[in-house]
Image (cartoon, rainbow, N blue to C red):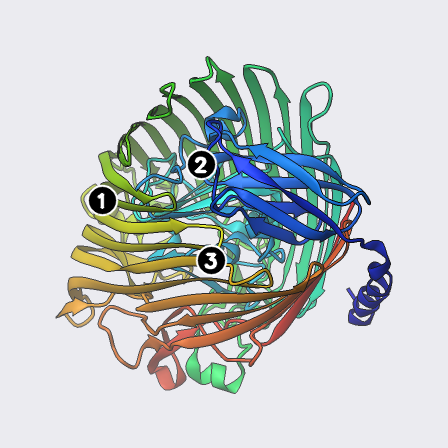
Amino acid sequence: MNKPILISLLFIALSFSSQLFAQQQIEGTVTDTSGQAMAGAHLQIVGLDRGTFTDNKGQFSFADIPNGEYSLQVSYLGFHTQTKSISVLPSGRKNISITLFPESKSTETALITAVRAAATDPVSQVTRSKDEIEAVYTGQDGAFLLEQLSPSIVSYSESGTNLSNYGQMRLRGIDQTRINITLNGVPLNDMIDQGVFFSNFSDFGNSLESVQIQRGVGTSTNGVSSYAGSVNFESLNLENSEPRAEVQLTGGSFNTQRASAEVHTGRMKNNTGFYSRFTKTNSDGYRYNSGTSSYSFFLSGAWFHKKHTLKFTGFLGRSKNQLAYLPVALSDIQNDPRTNYVSPNDEDDFGQWMSQLQHQYSISDKVQWSNTIYYSGAGGHFPAGFQDAEGNFTQIDYPLFNDHFGAMSNLSGRSANYNFRWNVGVHAYTFLRTNEEAIVPNYTSPYYRDQSQKEEIAAFVKIEQKWNRWRLFADAQLRSVLLDLEADEDFLGMMTSIPDRDWLFFNPKIGLSYKTGKASQLYASLGRTGREPTRFDILGSTQINSSNLDLVNDPGSVKAEYVNDLELGYRYRTAKLQYQINAFYMQFENEIAPIGAFIPEGFVQIYENQEQSRRYGIELDFLWNISSQWKWRGNATWMQAEISQYTDAATDVTFDNVTPILSPEWNIQNTLSFHPHEQTTLGIRLRYLGEQFMELTNDENLKVPSSWVSDFFVQYQFTSFLRANIQLNNIFDELYYTYGAPVSGAQGMTEPGYFVQPPRHVYASLHFIF
């Protein structure tokens, strides 16, 4: 959007807004089903940027609320979010009593409780509500959003926008392929490469009710191993939503333009509800030739009955990204920080889609049975250009196509007094992959084509027993995984039968928590999980060829990796102050770790088994409501990581006690916000990231330097139907990086290479709510 037009809209709306507000008060009490006051419950007036927490008596109040009709959302971890319609009239004070029910009382929410940890479980986790997501959301893709919601996450952007195009994240220094990511319990990961490409389904954050991020082994979930941690997204709740429509318009730096429109029907008289959203995003990118053009469509619908809920959720996304996947030598960055080595002619065209149908049956008020069937797919083209031996420009296209069919069933129950809970689940899928290579423009005549198939059946059992202040949690999962790789025999010029790879993983977890007071809890857990290698780990290439055929034919060439994870923590939650401090120790066996070099095609790093390694540290996540006007939220991680021994294949030199790549010692985020009055929020974010090694010999000349980055934001609520957000990021225009790798620089010398992250930039959004 044209900046002068945007500014004009803001000032025109501001000039009229002061006439629309009166001075009324809402107050009340929040209790659970037993009538006990709930301290620290969060309340949000939808449409107004007004939120608060209950005090130690479960009481809350809002002052200076304009006359009108509103929806009041009340949430508390482990309980179903309630949405209550309220009318604010000139008569003045309004008193409300609200009762929150445990999660299992909501038929729709019960669909995801099987793979999530409860608020009291002895697991290192944060659960962020829709309000908390919206507070930091500007339309950015998933990895960039998650970085702002949890401790120990670092992301990088290939285009240098931190909004769109390709990017990745790391959790506790461990890459994204070892993070389990699901939507309503259904896997989003590519089962063979095990990563998630958020760029394929942009504006995902607009369709979320909540997200839970578990760090470490956590609780059993569906899909790829929860090795570094897991991320469980929940789609928007339809059971208790209010009818409304919303249009979002975003514009800003890098010629960024985003338009999004969504409709909620609310729960209608026929006990159905629907939600749909369509988004179009365009950006030129900061780095040369790193633009994005994408669209996404999200749809969900549900039918509610006394004992049954049937819900469909689906999305479709497609993006065309100019490619920028190569790190750039420091000497070239110093000459021009926008440098991009990838050809301007290389633009991918890739899509991803998902459909899931879930049925929830309340056998009784104590027993719930949910079943899900789903189909997901992905496919598209990924060209890579280069100069051939005769100096001609040539492009090789690397298309791939996935089909993912799966089903899951979960049965959960509880005792009458909620002191005992149990959950059993089973998940099975088939994942089909086709990889091709073709010389552009001969898309229909590939010179290489292989196929892969992966099948899994997994089951878990979870139990939780409460005795007074003590809670015992136990969780065990069994995963049976089979991977079949089929080579292109015409390409190889020979017949070959590659042995199947199969793994059986037993993943046990046990934990104990103790409630030290009404607002505090101590917990400890111990878990173990194993993970199979990816296709890239096995091939070290995009194809099966004569150079890697011996390794591919050896099922033991890359071993499965395991982690033993110990977590110790303390939680405290009141209306004034909430925090969680967590200590962790992760001991790895045969860790499949990146070494800092890339496969010949340059898309991904080479990973190799490391016999013994470990990570340990302390994480802090907090929210301090300093006053009615000031709020301080932040997180911090201090971490130490070590691989006991690494042998460099190029020199045959062995290095002892080296630090794994891209594993910073310090990762700190802080946000201080100020509410001068009910319509306005101002804030500043500070982010510090410690230095990181970029290869396993720990060469001091090959590091990602530490960085301090500061952002400023302002939110203004003109009326209940119009809101504006402005974000000025990287205020001091720092040249900084969060990812790096060794590259061949001037005169063939090895030097550090980086992805330059965004310079000073601004995004502005208008939200129209009807």
Residue carrying label 1: 560
Q: Is residue 141 above or below residue 403?
A: below
Answer whether labels 1 and 3 touch (C-beta < 8 Å): no
What residue sits 32% from the left and 45% below the top?
521
Q: Is residue 641 left or right of residue 132?
A: left
Q: Determine which residue is flagged by label 3.
A: 623
Give the residue type that dot 3 points to: Leu
Q: In terms of sequence position, does the residue under pointer 1 or pointer 3 come before the other?
A: 1
Q: Where is residue 162 in the image (x, y as percent from the top left)?
A: 55, 64
Between the residue at mark 1 and the residue at mark 2, the CA separation in whole angstroms equals: 35 Å
Q: Can residue 179 be seen in this view?
A: no
Q: Nearer the viewer, residue 668 or 66?
A: 66
Q: In the rendered structure, which amino acid carries the disc numbered 1?
A: Ala
Q: Which of marks 1 and 3 is in front?
A: 3
The residue that disc 2 covers is 78
C-alpha separation, residue under disc 2 versus residue under disc 3: 18 Å
* Pointer 2 local density, CA inside 10 Å: few below 14, some 14–19, many at least 20: some
* Tag 2–tag 3 contact (CB < 8 Å): no
- Image coordinates of residue 149 in percent, x first then y, are 48, 55
Q: What residue type is labelled 2?
A: Gly
Marks 1 and 2 close (CB-CB < 8 Å): no
Location of residue 720 with respect to 2 vertically, above or below: above
Up/down of 191 relative to 247, above or below: above
Quarter where residue 116 is shown: top left
- Position of the N terminus, as image quadrant, is bottom right
| Residue 23 pos. (x, y %) | 77, 53
Q: Is residue 308 left or right of residue 699?
A: right
Find numbered disc 3 in the image and state the secondary structure of the residue it sits on: strand
> Seen in the image, is 516 located left or right of residue 347?
left
Return the disc, 1 or 2, that comes first in the chain's sequence. Answer: 2
